[in-house]
Image: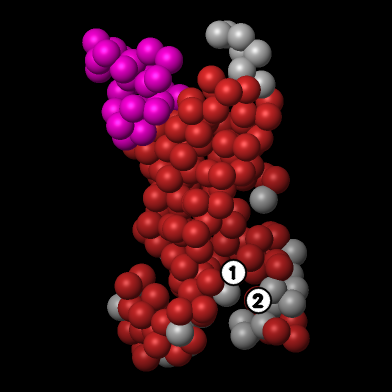
Amino acid sequence: MAVGSLPGQYIYYMSYEYVNELIKRHISHHPHSGKSWHAHPSGLISSSVAGLMAEFTSAFSYLPTDIVSQRLQMERKFNFLPEKFQNNNVPRIVRNIYQTEGLRGFLRGFWPYIIVNGPGSAVWWASYEWCKSILHRKVCINDQHVHPLNSFISGGIAGIISCLVTNPLDVARTRIQLFEVHSQKEKAKLGKGFAFIVKDIYGAEGFLGLYT
């Protein structure tokens, strides 16, 4: 994860700042584009779109390393993968994925990843910027500086909201990424898509299964 973290973080925050600033610049004439910008619906939409685009672009760095790290994290006694895929080093896992699935194997679950993390990022940034803007009047040091407690509280609230929204989708995404294809029946099941996996989890495990 450390390998993909640096470029992923760079791409993520660069995309967020660029898109957010681009949207704000195009509607800079709006009467709420000043201090209260992020508390206004236009500001919330801007933060949401920027967060979504940031997740989309950074996925090309995060997703391949996420898939490899998940293979490494699987313990042998709980592992449903073939033995040759278990408890291996990174080069061997990378080679196995490439040989069996090609480059597409490193982006398996790309759209489920976006479906999960895209809205999560959008909700997080909109919630964070909104809370920070509202709390600014309460805990700011002066007009130019925001007290660290503001960011602390805003980030915590945003994290809770985002988690509640996206955890069911994240459970389904992880299962798609770790699902191994050994027969045409399994391939057909995987090919039915993200919505089918969510429905399958709900049918087998109920509502709580989506919050595993």
| Residue 169 x %, y % | 44, 65
The residue stretch that appears in magenta: 17-45
Mark 2 secondary-structure assignment: helix
- Foreground of the two, 69 or 53: 53
| Residue 94 x %, y % | 61, 61
Q: Amino acid at mark 1?
A: Asn
Residue at the extreme front of the image, as rendered: 138
Q: Name which of mark 1 and mark 2 comes first in the sequence.
A: 2
Q: Is the C-beta separation of discs 1 and 2 under 8 Å?
A: yes
Residue at 65%, 76% (x, y): give it: 85
- Residue under numbered circle 2: 85
Is the magenta region chiefly helix, strand or loop? helix
Mark 1 secondary-structure assignment: helix
Q: Quadrant for residue 68, please give it.
A: bottom right
189 displayed left or right of 132: left
5 displayed left or right of 118: right
| Residue 103 x %, y % | 46, 58
Q: Is residue 136 one of those drawn in magenta?
A: no
Image: 44 above or below 52: above
* Mark 2 crowdedness (10 Å alpha carbons): few <14, some 14-19, many ≥20: some
Image: 45 above or below 60: above
- Foreground of the two, 57 or 161: 161
Identify the disc placed on residue 96.
1
1 vs 2, front mark: 2
Q: Is residue 22 one of those drawn in magenta?
A: yes
- Foreground of the two, 204 or 111: 204
Residue at 59%, 39% (x, y): give it: 155
Q: Amino acid at mark 2?
A: Phe
Q: How is the image coloured?
A: secondary structure
| Residue 107 x %, y % | 45, 58
Residue 35 visible within the image = yes
- Foreground of the two, 110 or 202: 202
